[in-house]
């Protein structure tokens, strides 16, 4: 049998396939999670391998260390069923296994091989796209989607999700006009595509269009705000537009209503919260007890360190927000050990970006602005190697501006950085805020 896009599948059960199709739609739309659908697929056809690989891939794509054992168990279940699986599904097992072993680069290479043979394999594309994001590979965020898109029928129900991916890839390659156009095309379809509303928000963020951004996200709430795993990140983007307008109370209110407390369950959600509180603090707001609230249930110690350098740097922000330098130093030590010993993708990212960033943040927190600037300034050229988006990594630039504006900072450097920032963003209230602080 083939799935709806013509890819061979290792089941002859229409019912099992129907459940797996819903699961794959959930993965690219972020509406609910696909686990119950995959269990239903396995119940219909217990010998089918693919649902187990899809489960593993979904869990891995959350970059949550606590979910790794579950992902590995699913891969073991898949392996037990591999003998009778078609080559495409066995290739998926190989790719997800590499991913589980921490070889994110190797996993993306294997997903690309699948896509060469099966350009309409949505799981291979979705996971490669997400891990291109986690690896900071902007060229492939754009190129990998572009390489398969013409092989899809425009009326395929999943086609709008590819447009969403392409829009985000274009945005991360600084092709803002094209990104916005493609993102709006995806949003004009009947399907709800939060990845596309998000891509357009990114364009507006990078261009300093905070009023457009607020309007866009408020007007598209029906797409992303309810029952969607990507909602928290959209709220974070809305918070950024409030910050660009220097509406700090508005950003805090959004945080309280949609990001803090019970809204932050996964590290991916918590790190957005940490990033927003850190930015608020840089701009002069006092997050108060929100840091402690955000820390609840988040392992900020050495246990989880080393899985994602990007996540570790955000965990450090929380410890600095809590004024817990002892635990912050412990976390840095753990990240450093992994960076020095490990040979996986994350170890390289930690060596190149994560560890110097954490050291720079610690120096900034200690008021050693010369050391903070010495450590953070070179990261402007390399920070994309540890993943995330331009908007997320802008936290480094904002910390640099604050370091430059602080007593014993470097005003001339700060003004130069701000001049560059104005190229894309123009004059915004936040730009004016930094101009005043750097003139003081
Ligand atoms: Fe984003």
Image (spheres, helix red, strand yellow):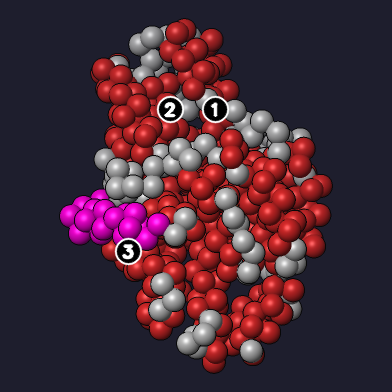
Q: Residues within 10 Å of mark 3 (few under 14, many from 20)?
A: many
Magenta residue check for 329: yes
Indicate which disc, 2 or 3, sits on the residue closer to the N terminus.
2
Residue 82, by quadrant, is: top left
- Viewer can see residue 257: yes
For image coordinates 61% across by 82% down, the residue present is 418
Q: Do the residues labelled 2 and 1 touch (CB within 8 Å)?
A: no
Residue lying at 51% horizontally and 71% vertically, measured from the top left: 399
Quarter of the image that includes the C terminus: bottom right
Quadrant of residue 246 within the rendered picture? bottom right
Label 2, label 3: how far apart the Cα atoms are: 33 Å
Query: Is the CB atom of the residue marked by disc 3 within 8 angstroms of ligand 1's nearest atom?
Result: no
Residue 254: % across, % down: 70, 49
Q: Where is residue 240 in the image (x, y as percent from the top left)?
A: 66, 59
Residue 88 drawn at (x, y percent): 37, 30
The residue sitting at 51% across, 48% down in the picture is 292
Q: Nearer the viewer, mark 2 or mark 1?
A: 1
Q: Mark 1 points at which residue?
A: 33
Which is closer to the viewer, label 2 or label 3?
Answer: 3
Describe the element under mark 1 as helix, strand or loop: loop
Name the foreground residue: 244 vs 74.
244
CB of mark 2 within 8 Å of CB of mark 3?
no
Q: Is residue 102 above or below residue 320?
A: above
On the image, numbered disc 3 is attached to which residue? Answer: 355
Q: Give the percent coordinates (x, y) of residue 290.
A: 58, 50
Horizontal placement of 44 versus 434: left or right? Answer: left
Q: Name the residue under label 2.
A: 54
* Residue in the picture at 81% in, 47% down: 219
Report whether 286 appears left or right of 15: right
Q: Per the image, is 205 magenta?
A: no
The magenta-colored residue range is: 324-344
């Amino acid at each position: 049998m083939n799935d709806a896009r013509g890819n061979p599948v290792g089941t002859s059960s229409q019912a099992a396939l129907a459940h797996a199709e819903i699961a794959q739609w959930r993965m690219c739309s972020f509406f609910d999670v696909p686990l119950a659908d995959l269990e239903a697929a396995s119940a219909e056809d217990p010998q089918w391998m693919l649902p187990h690989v899809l489960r593993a891939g979904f869990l891995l794509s959350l970059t949550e260390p606590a979910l790794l054992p579950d992902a590995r168990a699913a891969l073991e279940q898949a392996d037990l069923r591999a003998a009778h699986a078609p080559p495409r599904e066995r290739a998926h097992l190989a790719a997800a296994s590499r991913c589980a072993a921490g070889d994110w680069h190797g996993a993306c290479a294997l997903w690309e091989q699948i896509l060469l043979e099966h350009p309409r394999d949505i799981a291979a594309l979705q996971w490669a796209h997400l891990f291109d994001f986690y690896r900071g590979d902007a060229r492939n965020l754009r190129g990998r989607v572009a390489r398969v898109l013409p092989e899809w029928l425009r009326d395929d129900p999943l086609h709008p999700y590819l447009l969403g991916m392409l829009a985000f890839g274009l945005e991360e390659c600084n092709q803002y006009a094209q990104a916005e156009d493609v993102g709006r095309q995806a949003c004009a379809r009947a399907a709800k595509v939060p990845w596309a509303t998000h891509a357009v928000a990114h364009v507006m963020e990078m261009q300093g269009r905070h009023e457009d951004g607020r309007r866009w996200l408020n007007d598209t709430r029906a797409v992303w705000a309810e029952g969607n795993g990507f909602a928290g990140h959209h709220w974070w983007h809305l918070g950024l537009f409030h910050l660009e307008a220097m509406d700090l109370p508005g950003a805090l209110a959004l945080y309280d209503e949609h990001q803090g407390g019970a809204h932050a369950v996964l590290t991916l959600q918590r790190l957005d919260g940490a990033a927003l509180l850190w930015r608020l603090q840089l701009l002069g707001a006092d997050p108060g007890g929100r840091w402690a609230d955000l820390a609840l249930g988040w392992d900020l110690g050495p246990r989880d360190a080393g899985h994602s350098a990007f996540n570790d740097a955000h965990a450090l922000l929380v410890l600095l927000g809590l004024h817990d330098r002892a635990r912050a130093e412990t976390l840095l030590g753990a990240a450093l050990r992994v960076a020095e010993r490990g040979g996986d993708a994350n170890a390289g990212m930690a060596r190149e970006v994560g560890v110097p960033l954490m050291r720079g943040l610690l120096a900034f927190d200690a008021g050693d602005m010369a050391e903070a600037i010495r450590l953070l300034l070179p990261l402007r050229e390399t920070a994309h190697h540890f993943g995330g988006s331009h908007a997320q990594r802008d936290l480094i630039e904002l910390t640099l501006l604050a370091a430059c504006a602080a007593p014993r900072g470097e005003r001339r450097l700060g003004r130069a950085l701000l001049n560059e920032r104005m190229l894309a963003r123009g004059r915004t209230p936040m730009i004016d805020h930094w101009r005043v602080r750097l003139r003081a």
